[in-house]
C-alpha cells in the first residue's frame, strides 16, 4: 500500500474513514515501536500510539501535503513521546536517574522485552541519554532515517542532529565499556 | 573499546499477542467516543475560545515583554564570551540542549569536528562546547 493510495482515500470524504483505517494499519507498528523505544513500558507506548492516531484523525483536514504522511505522523509521535516523558518526570517528582532506574529494571525483567545481554545493555545505555538525544538516536540508528528526514521530523538542523547523534554514540560506547 | 557497529541490531521490544490486530478498532472506538454532542465540546466553540485566548495572550505579551526583552538583549550584549562560557559550564544546561537549539550548517559542523575531535571522551564535550560557542551566533 503506497502513501499516495492512502492519501487519496483520506481526501475523499466518502472514503475517509476507510482511508484512516488503512493509515493506521500501515503506520501503527512503526509508531508503536518508536514510542516503545522512548518510553519502554508497553502500556505507556500503547497510550501514546493511540493518542498519535487520534491526533492524526482530528487534524487530517490540516494536512497540506508539505511533507509526507510518514514524516507528519512521525513528527506527532516524536512530540507525544517527548511530552509524555516530561510530564512523567514532573508528575513523579523523580530525578531523571530514578525514572531511568525503573526502566532499566523493566528491561531486565519484562516478559515483553527479549534480546541477549548485550542488546539489553544497549537499551540501558540509550536510557542514559536526554530525551531529545534519545529520540534522535532511535530515529537514526534503529529507524535508519537520513538526517534530512530527521530534521523534518524534529525541526532541528542537520548539523545539530549530526553533533547530537555523534555524542550519543560516544556516550553509549562509553557506557557499554564501563558496565 | 566496544563499538556500536559491533552489536547486532535487533528489535527487543515485543507486543502482546494480537495487539496490532486489535489496535485499529480500539482507536476507532476512542475517536467515536470523543465526538461530543454537547455544544461546548464542539470544535467550533473550542476554536473560537482558543483564538480569543491566543489574541489576548499575544497582546499581553507584546505590551508587557517588549520593553523587558529589549533590556535583556542590551544587557546580554555587554557580557563577554568568557563569562558566558563560565556560566554555561556551571549551569545545569546540557551540551545536547545547546546543540539542538543552535542552527549550524553542515560545513560548520564538519569544520568543528575536524579541528576539535579527539578520542578522549572525557574532553570531547568540553571541546565541542567551546568551539560551538566560538562559531555560533546564538548561544541559547
Image: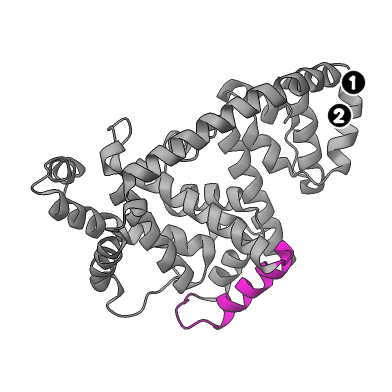
| Mark 2 in CB contact with mark 1 (< 8 angstroms) | yes
Q: Which mark is residue B49?
A: none
Instruction: Using the numbered discs, state the Cα–Cα distance from disc 2 to disc 1 in whole angstroms.
Output: 6 Å
**Picture residue at 52% right of the left edge, 60% below the top:** A38
Q: Is residue B115 above or below residue A5?
A: above
Find disc 2 in the rendering and name its residue.
B84
**Picture residue at 21% right of the left edge, 43% below the top:** A3
- Residue A116 location (% of width, % of height): 52, 76
Q: Residues within 10 Å of mark 2 (few under 14, many from 20)?
A: some
Left/right placement of residue A73 relative to residue B105 reads left
Magenta stretch: dominant secondary structure: helix
Q: Which residue ends up furthest to the left in the rendered image?
A: A14
Q: Is residue B39 magenta?
A: no
Local SS, label 1: loop
- Residue B56 in view here: yes
Local SS, label 2: helix
Q: In this rendered view, identify the residue nearer to me: A159 or A177.
A: A159
Left/right placement of residue B76 relative to residue B3 reads right
**Chain containing the residue with disc 2:** B
Query: Magenta stretch?
Result: A93-115
Left/right placement of residue A21 relative to residue A50 reads left
Q: Is residue A101 magenta?
A: yes
Q: Which residue ends up furthest to the front in the rendered image?
A: B39
**Picture residue at 59% right of the left edge, 44% below the top:** A165
Left/right placement of residue B72 relative to residue A23 reads right
- Residue A136 location (% of width, % of height): 53, 47
Q: Please identify the quadrant where the C terminus of chain B is shown.
A: top right
Q: Is residue B21 above or below residue A2?
A: below
Find disc 1 in the rendering and name its residue.
B80
Amino acid at each position: 500500500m503506497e502513501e499516495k493510495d492512502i492519501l487519496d482515500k483520506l481526501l475523499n470524504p466518502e472514503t475517509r474513514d476507510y482511508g484512516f483505517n488503512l493509515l493506521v494499519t500501515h503506520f501503527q507498528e512503526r509508531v508503536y515501536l518508536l514510542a516503545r523505544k522512548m518510553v519502554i513500558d508497553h502500556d505507556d507506548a500503547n497510550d501514546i500510539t493511540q493518542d498519535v492516531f487520534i491526533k492524526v484523525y482530528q487534524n487530517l483536514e490540516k494536512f497540506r501535503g508539505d511533507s509526507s504522511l510518514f514524516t507528519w505522523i512521525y513528527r506527532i509521535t516524536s512530540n507525544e513521546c517527548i511530552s509524555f516523558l516530561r510530564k512523567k518526570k514532573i508528575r513523579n517528582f523523580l530525578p531523571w536517574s530514578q525514572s531511568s532506574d525503573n526502566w532499566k529494571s523493566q528491561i531486565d525483567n519484562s516478559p515483553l522485552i527479549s534480546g541477549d545481554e548485550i542488546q539489553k545493555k544497549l537499551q540501558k545505555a540509550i536510557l542514559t541519554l536526554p530525551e531529545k538525544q534519545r529520540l534522535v538516536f532511535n530515529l537514526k540508528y534503529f529507524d535508519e532515517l537520513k538526517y534530512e528526514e530527521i530534521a523534518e521530523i524534529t525541526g532541528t538542523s542537520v548539523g545539530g542532529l549530526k553533533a547530537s547523534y555523534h555524542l550519543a554514540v560516544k556516550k553509549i560506547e562509553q557506557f557499554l565499556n564501563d558496565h | 573499546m566496544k563499538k556500536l557497529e559491533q552489536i547486532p541490531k535487533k528489535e527487543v521490544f515485543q507486543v502482546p499477542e494480537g495487539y496490532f490486530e486489535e489496535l485499529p478498532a480500539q482507536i476507532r472506538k476512542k475517536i467515536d467516543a470523543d465526538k461530543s454532542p454537547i455544544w461546548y465540546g464542539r470544535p467550533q466553540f473550542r476554536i473560537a475560545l482558543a483564538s480569543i485566548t491566543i489574541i489576548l495572550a499575544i497582546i499581553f505579551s507584546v505590551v508587557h515583554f517588549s520593553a523587558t526583552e529589549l533590556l535583556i538583549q542590551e544587557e546580554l550584549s555587554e557580557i563577554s564570551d568568557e563569562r558566558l562560557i563560565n556560566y554555561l559550564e556551571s549551569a545545569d544546561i546540557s551540551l545536547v540542549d545547546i546543540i539542538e537549539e543552535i542552527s549550524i550548517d553542515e560545513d560548520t559542523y564538519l569544520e568543528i569536528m575536524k579541528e576539535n575531535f579527539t578520542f578522549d571522551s572525557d574532553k570531547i564535550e568540553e571541546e565541542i562546547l567551546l568551539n560551538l560557542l566560538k562559531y555560533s551566533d546564538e548561544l541559547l
